[in-house]
Amino acid sequence: MIVPARRFAVLGVLTAALTACGTPQAPPAARPAPARHTVAPAPVHPQPRPQPPTLAPGPAGLTPVFTHGPRTPDRTVALTFDADMTADQGARAARGEHFDNPALIRTLRALKVPATVFMTGRWAEQYPAQARGIGRDPLFEVANHSYSHYAFTGGCYGLPTVSPDRMRADVERAYTAFREAGVEHALPYFRFPGGCHDERALKELAPAGVTAVQWDVVSGDAFATDADAVARQVLDGVRPGSVVVMHCTRSAAPATERAVRTIVPELRRRGFRFVKVSELIGAAAARH
């Protein structure tokens, strides 16, 4: 048994020993409560966009040309609208000339009509918000109508011409203008300004990998003021698989929006279904 005096002596020795070894460690802190485990959501991987259908190259590797879809009992028709503006019309736009037609786009949306807009790069530069809105609307698809809207052959409605060595660059410049305007998925379809082309133009554009899209129904809306006459011309010409060419330019085609309000309900009454050009090209490619 240790007497009190000796107990104090022993405690002193122990304290000295602990001091020589360093400051005593503080008692360990209480462990925090384990965190509640949550399951992280699985990452969402966007589905890749399907590749738009195109036609195989023509003879000798020339750019293929599409005019209309199959003439089948499935009564489909594609309304197409050229958004024209040439490279040198900026001054006219600055003076107040309207190369756009927002009322037409609103009418197509109100009537729920799918359509293909063949847009020039210069038009997209002039109206980037409208180009972006059309390009992001699933009702529409945007295709290439050149950058400059200069002709790819001579003698084409008085249009200036693109030299053969600049043809592909003009088309690619339009795609660049689309991307800069926010049109992310312009299709590999090309419409020649004025529809004018020859074998040389088809050869020069072959490396661009586009399908040239023409038409089999001319609406006659360019510079027309009689909407009823435009509507009659379209209604008289449409057949299953038809591609109708019209314009999305107030100054050059002021009657188009009014004509569309007649054309659409009448064709639906006749049993036609409106589709984009890509659907017609897909149907044509499937038959070959």
Image (spheres, rainbow, N blue to C red):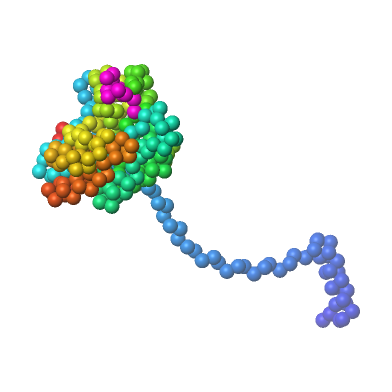
As drawn, is 25 to the left or to the right of 129? Answer: right
Q: Which residues are magenta?
A: 149-159
Quadrant of the rendered image containing residue 210: top left
As drawn, is 96 to the left or to the right of 272? Answer: right
Q: Residue at x 42, y 40 (%)?
A: 128
Q: Residue at x 30, y 23 (%)?
A: 158
Viewer-proximal residue among 5 and 261:
261
User: Is residue 78 in view?
Assistant: no
Viewer-proximal residue among 231 and 218:
231
Quadrant of the rendered image containing residue 40: bottom left
In the rendering, at what x and y percent does residue 253 appear? Answer: 28, 37
Q: Residue at x 45, y 60 (%)?
A: 39
As drawn, is 108 to the left or to the right of 76? Answer: right
Up/down of 116 relative to 32, above or below: above
Query: In the rendered structure, does residue 152 fall within the stretch colored magenta?
Result: yes
In the rendering, at what x and y percent does residue 231 appear? Answer: 19, 42
In the rendering, at what x and y percent does residue 152 appear? Answer: 30, 22
The total number of labels drawn is 0
Q: Which of the image's four quarters has the N terminus?
A: bottom right
Q: Which of the image's four quarters has the C terminus?
A: top left
Q: Residue at x 47, y 62 (%)?
A: 38
User: Is residue 163 in view?
Assistant: yes
In the rendering, at what x and y percent does residue 115 appear? Answer: 26, 43
Query: In the rendered structure, does residue 48 fall within the stretch colored magenta?
Result: no
As drawn, is 221 to the left or to the right of 119? Answer: left
